[in-house]
Image (cartoon, rainbow, N blue to C red):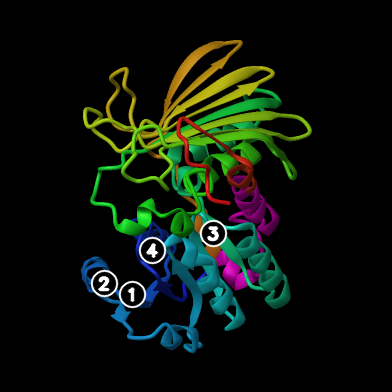
Amino acid sequence: MAPQPGFAFAAIGINHGHIYGQTEVMIDAGCRLKSFFAPEDDLAAAYGDAFPGAVRVSDEQAILDDPEILLVIGAGILCDRAPMAVRAMRHGKDVMLDKPGATSLDQLAELRSVQAETGRILSILYSEHYTQRAAIAAGDLVKAGAIGRVMQTTGLGPHREGNYPRPDWFYSHDKTGGILCDIGSHQAEQFLFFAGASSAEVVSSQVANFDHPERPEFEDFGQMLLVSDAASGFVRVDWFTQDGLPIWGDGRLFILGTEGTIELRKYIDIAGRPGGDHLFLVDRDGVRHIDCSATEITYGRQLRDDVLNRTETAMSQAHCFLATELALKAQAMATRIGGSRPSPG
């Protein structure tokens, strides 16, 4: 089959650095960034320098009313993402959001309703999976039966708070939805994917502010236990990556199968191998280290084709929403530990 042609897309909301990766995967797929809207001059200047072919518009309506633009991407302040997606879908645009796609169950319900009403695509780029080469390679191995049936996953998502200056909204629960809603959604999505689950429940969840008393709404630690009808998943996320680590977080994923195990060291191997994208496979034949740095990232190309062909190859709509739902439910039911202030409801 001949490669599909690209199309014009635009960005609305560039408050998180993930917008650069979102933009690049679509450009790599042959699409063209036509325009962007951002009210913040400093963020707009940096983004415009990175993508000089795009025009900064003064009002998002210019993007929503542009018939040439088929896809809108966004990484705005977290609580603003779902409302933007709703506006875009109602203007006939497909949408790709940074995670989380919503910061409340009410927002998620509206996203689901409007997506069903309009028939547009709402995709959430869970970058710790879909643009992470070791995770993509692990998915291929699991699909091929390399470790048998998956029974359990353990996802660890440590982050560094100070790898760049954080704006005030970063510490606001209303703006971010909380740690499990935000970075926990990466891990919820990976559990569903590797367990092959189309339904799951939150068994328990906890959040904490262990070391930021000056930021009482901030959660610097979170964990949750998830179950499907055939697998279990444990998640731990935190903001305690120390300055001695040369990257922003030692993200890992452990996958337990009936015939083997996979460990991903996504961004660094602290045992000493250079670079990231490390996969360790243990099966009946032994132990293997697999360098995944050449694994192809297919998400952008698949989303491009989905937009053009009205298909679901990048991810199913149900999967996209369920990952967000699990993270939001875990956040809503979380017990606050290690502090006296209850988590906002």
Among numbered discs 3 and 2, the one appearing first in the sequence: 2
Type of amino acid at the residue the image marks with label 2:
Ala
Specify whether 174 is left or right of 47.
right
Can residue 57 be seen here?
A: yes
CB within 8 Å, label 2 to label 1: yes
Residue wearing tag 4: 23
For the residue labelled by badge 4, is the local secondary structure a helix, a strand or a loop? helix
Rate crowding at label 4 as few (under 14), some (14 to 19) or many (20 or more) other CA atoms within 10 Å: many
Among numbered discs 3 and 4, the one appearing first in the sequence: 4
Residue at the far right: name it.
Answer: 229
Residue wearing tag 3: 101
User: x, y (%) of residue 123?
Assistant: 57, 61
Specify whether 255 is left or right of 21.
right
The image quadrant of residue 52 is: bottom left
Q: Is 267 included in the stretch rendered in magenta?
A: no
Residue wearing tag 2: 44
For the residue labelled by badge 1, is the local secondary structure a helix, a strand or a loop? loop
Rate crowding at label 3 as few (under 14), some (14 to 19) or many (20 or more) other CA atoms within 10 Å: many
